[in-house]
Image (cartoon, helix red, strand yellow):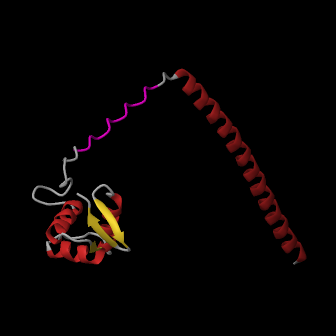
């Protein structure tokens, strides 16, 4: 009985050794083939004519911006700046940004921002030649 089990163990060890040997041989062969492939690709690159790079597509032309105060809003729409000027001309007095925002909303201007008062404040501060700050958060029309 010891003899049978010893034979079985010996056979199993031989199979494992053969398997490991075969694995090592295959790994070496793979390494050789990779080296050959790199050499072949290098030769192909040297022999192949360089392909011209495809031309870059022309940059897309942007539509021209419309001139004047309705820029980008379409025909019949007024910009915030123009509507602010009209509001100041109607009232003929300095106004707070809250009042101006409410006036623009009444006149039908739809703000895209969550805080429209910030839009009005930015326009008033950006156009110093048109609007003048008279008090905190209060502006007047210069011209």
Give the image quarter of residue 80.
Answer: bottom left
Residue beneath the point at 84% across and 73% down? 4
Residue 44, compared with residue 63, is above or below; it is above
Quadrant where the N terminus is found in the figure: bottom right
Identify the image quadrant of residue 114: bottom left
In the image: residue 63, left or right of residue 119? left
The outermost residue toward the left is: 76
| Position of residue 8 measured from the top left corner of the image (x, y, whole percent) | 81, 69
Is residue 138 or residue 10 the one in the foreground?
Answer: 138
In the rendering, at what x and y percent does residue 99 appear?
24, 77
The main secondary structure of the magenta stretch is: loop
Q: Say whether residue 61 is magenta.
A: yes
Q: Nearer the viewer, residue 125 or 111?
A: 125
Range of magenta residues: 51-63
Q: Is residue 2 left or right of residue 138?
A: right
Residue at 22 percent across and 65 percent down: it is 84
Image coordinates for residue 73, horizontal then vertical, percent: 18, 58
Q: Which residue corresponds to the image point at 22% horizontal and 77% vertical from the top-left?
A: 102
Q: Residue at x 48, y 24 (%)?
A: 50
| Rendered location of residue 87, percent (x, y) | 18, 68
In this view of the protein, which residue sits in the foreground, 45 or 71?
Answer: 71
Q: Total number of numbered labels?
A: 0
Q: Examine the rendered structure and indicate whether residue 36 appears above or below residue 93.
A: above
């Amino acid at each position: 009985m010891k003899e049978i089990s010893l034979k079985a163990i010996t056979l199993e060890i031989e199979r494992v050794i053969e398997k490991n040997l075969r694995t090592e041989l295959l790994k070496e062969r793979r390494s050789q083939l990779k080296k050959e492939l790199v050499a072949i690709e290098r030769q192909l690159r040297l022999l192949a004519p360089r392909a011209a790079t495809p031309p870059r597509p022309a940059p897309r032309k942007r539509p021209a911006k419309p001139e004047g105060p309705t820029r980008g809003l379409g025909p019949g729409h007024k910009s915030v700046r123009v509507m602010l000027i009209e509001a100041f001309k109607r009232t003929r007095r300095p106004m707070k940004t809250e009042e101006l925002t409410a006036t623009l909303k009444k006149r039908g201007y739809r703000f895209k921002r969550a805080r429209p008062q910030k839009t009005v404040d930015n326009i008033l501060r950006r156009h110093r030649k048109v609007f003048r700050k008279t008090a905190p958060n209060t502006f007047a029309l210069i011209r």
